[in-house]
């Protein structure tokens, strides 16, 4: 059985990864294998192309050095058959008439455009905007960012010839064409969400863009869910190790790409994607009432294949872990602290129905019950709990926040489709394959059994997998999925739901809904 080589690029909030992946033609033909990864801190737009080409050359060199051949191919013949690019959403940069970036990224986490989002909501109606786009007006949506640009950086706005998202800019360098994916366009609040079963638009919405003085031709073309963006053009990328003419796909929003690669593709399947932020995504057969989704603080989206789905996000996942290490770990390394939590006996852990509750909100809560003022708090008596025990309560807090998002999401989905009954929760991202303490808490506090994806870079790997699929090189009816861990990271069985899980969730939700139940933990405002 031969495997196909694909290259996946993941431009994330914190880090950028390039992965060379060996992929069987179908799920029945074996496992997806991650052959080599090269990574670097995510660069600003002007440096993106050079950094990505350097990482590509490193990944290909690493793979060549590690093997004398892959399935009979000589080690020097490692050029991928397709390239996929995934990225963070709601982030972009203006381009000048020559396609050069004008300044730094305008990022999703900048919180600069709150006033502009409010003005758009007042002018067009918050409910009407959500009904049209599936996205709640907020400071992070690019439509509001473009309004902010006109008001606060008129020079850069006047020089804007095009607007590019992160993956779009990478694909522009690869192919010469400015193209995006509908999962990224759908996070902009400038792209209309069609009824279930209708074709996805191939352009951003003229009426919404007119609100910020732009036209659809200022933004990327939107590729269909089964289409590639273009092909690698001759030039520097060929020198980095790619072949001219290789298909390039804008794979899409990082969380959506990882979920699809992990096998979350059909109605009722659910993914929990963890990185700097965390996203819970449930695939549906029909749209719920859109106003109900908006009130819950969630988004109505389409999967990379075009199916309806609910997306719930928390900005405080990996970001919360970093905050805790800075403020509560007493200088302990993450490896030391989490290893201690993973081996903590049950009698050494805080009581889940009576001990301290950690609310993991570094910068507000998006959903459920949106509360932008929510911050990190330790609710209850800390006395008698050392650093390890409190860290155990912190990972419980992260797991309970994700469980709360999932339960609210399933209730919304069941209102539209009473048969919606997920049988497992697929967890992916770096912590899923490395952090046994966090995954133990997630499994014990989940309402359904958990499947952990055994891939250190699921988004980059998924981007390669999706590019091969869109290029028509994989079995269209049975594309491969990322493998699963047999137990916890590092060994040991994966526990099932804990008897106290529901009671712990109810207590967590009560604390989260009462922001005055305790003073903030020391240093509690990052």
Image: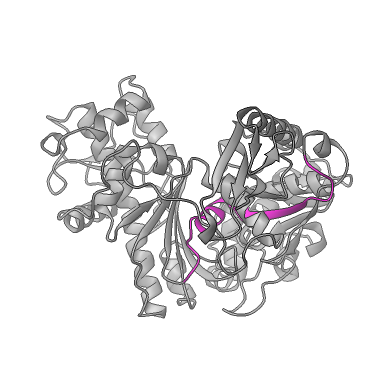
Is residue 504 left or right of 292 when viewed as pictured? left
Height in image: 146 above or below 389?
below
Q: Residue furthest top?
A: 331
Is residue 465 left or right of 378 when viewed as pictured? right
**Is residue 248 magenta-colored?**
yes
Q: Residue at x 49, y 52 (%)?
A: 482
Q: Residue at x 65, y 36 (%)?
A: 69
Q: Residue at x 83, y 41 (%)?
A: 100
Place of residue 27 in the rendered image (x, y in percent of width and height, measured from the top left): 52, 60
The C terminus appears in which quarter of the rendering?
top left
Comparing 271 with 391, the one in front is 271
Magenta stretch bounds: 242-266
Place of residue 106 in the rendered image (x, y in percent of width and height, measured from the top left): 66, 43
Is residue 463 left or right of 98 when viewed as pictured? left
Height in image: 181 above or below 285?
above
Comparing 143 with 497, the one in front is 497
Comparing 385 with 452, the one in front is 452
The quarter of the displayed image where residue 319 is located: top left
Height in image: 193 above or below 280?
below
Place of residue 487 in the rendered image (x, y in percent of width and height, measured from the top left): 31, 45
Decide if residue 526 is in sight here.
no
The quarter of the displayed image where residue 268 is located: bottom left
Place of residue 321 in the rendered image (x, y in percent of width and height, measured from the top left): 38, 35
Q: Residue at x 10, y 37 (%)?
A: 347
Is residue 495 left or right of 429 when viewed as pictured? left
**Is residue 15 magenta-colored?**
no
Decide if residue 471 is in sight here.
yes
Say how many tags the image has. Answer: 0
The colouring scheme, among rainbow, by chain, secondary structure or one colour, is one colour
């Amino acid at each position: 059985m031969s495997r196909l080589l694909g290259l996946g690029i993941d431009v994330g909030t914190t880090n950028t990864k390039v992965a060379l992946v060996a992929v069987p033609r179908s799920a029945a033909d074996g496992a997806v294998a991650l052959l080599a990864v090269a990574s670097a801190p995510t660069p600003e737009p002007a440096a993106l192309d050079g950094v990505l080409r350097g990482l590509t050359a490193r990944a290909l060199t690493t793979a060549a050095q590690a093997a004398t051949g892959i399935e009979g191919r000589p080690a020097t013949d490692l050029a991928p058959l397709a390239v996929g690019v995934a990225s963070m959403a709601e982030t972009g940069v203006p381009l000048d008439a020559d396609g050069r970036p004008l300044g730094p990224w305008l990022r999703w986490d900048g919180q600069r455009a709150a006033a502009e989002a409010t003005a758009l909501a007042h002018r067009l109606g918050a409910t009407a905007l959500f009904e049209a786009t599936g996205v709640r007006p907020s400071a992070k949506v690019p439509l509001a960012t473009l309004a902010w640009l006109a008001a606060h950086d008129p020079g850069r706005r006047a020089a804007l010839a095009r607007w590019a998202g992160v993956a779009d800019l990478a694909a522009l360098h690869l192919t010469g064409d400015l193209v995006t994916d509908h999962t990224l366009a759908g996070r902009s609040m400038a792209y209309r969400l069609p009824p279930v079963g209708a074709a996805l638009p191939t352009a951003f919405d003229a009426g919404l863009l007119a609100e910020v003085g732009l036209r659809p031709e200022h933004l990327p073309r939107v590729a269909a869910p089964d289409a590639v963006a273009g092909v690698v053009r001759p030039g520097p990328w060929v020198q980095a190790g790619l072949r001219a003419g290789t298909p390039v796909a804008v794979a899409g929003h990082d969380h959506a790409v990882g979920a699809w690669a992990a096998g979350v593709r059909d109605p009722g399947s659910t993914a929990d994607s963890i990185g700097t932020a965390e996203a819970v995504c449930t695939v549906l057969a029909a749209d719920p009432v859109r106003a109900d989704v908006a009130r819950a603080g969630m988004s109505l989206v389409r999967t990379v294949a075009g199916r309806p789905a609910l997306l719930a996000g928390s900005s405080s996942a990996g970001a919360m872990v970093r905050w805790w290490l800075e403020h509560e770990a007493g200088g302990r390394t993450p490896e030391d602290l989490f290893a201690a939590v993973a081996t903590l006996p049950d009698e050494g852990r805080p009581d889940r129905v009576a001990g301290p509750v950690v609310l993991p909100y570094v910068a507000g809560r998006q959903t459920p019950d949106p509360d932008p003022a929510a911050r990190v708090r330790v609710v209850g008596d800390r006395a008698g709990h050392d650093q390890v025990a409190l860290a155990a309560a912190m990972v419980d807090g992260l797991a309970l926040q994700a469980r709360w998002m999932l339960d609210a999401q399933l209730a919304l989905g069941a209102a539209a489709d009473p048969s919606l009954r997920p049988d497992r929760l697929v967890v992916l991202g770096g912590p899923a394959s490395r952090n046994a303490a966090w995954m133990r808490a997630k499994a014990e506090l989940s309402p359904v059994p958990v499947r952990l994806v055994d891939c250190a870079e699921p988004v980059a790997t998924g981007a390669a997998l999706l590019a091969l699929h869109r290029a028509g090189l994989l079995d269209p009816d049975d594309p491969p999925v990322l493998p699963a861990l047999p137990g916890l990271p590092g060994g040991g069985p994966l526990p099932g739901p804990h008897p106290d899980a529901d009671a712990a969730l109810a207590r967590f939700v009560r604390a989260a809904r009462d922001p005055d139940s305790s003073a903030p933990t020391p240093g509690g405002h990052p």
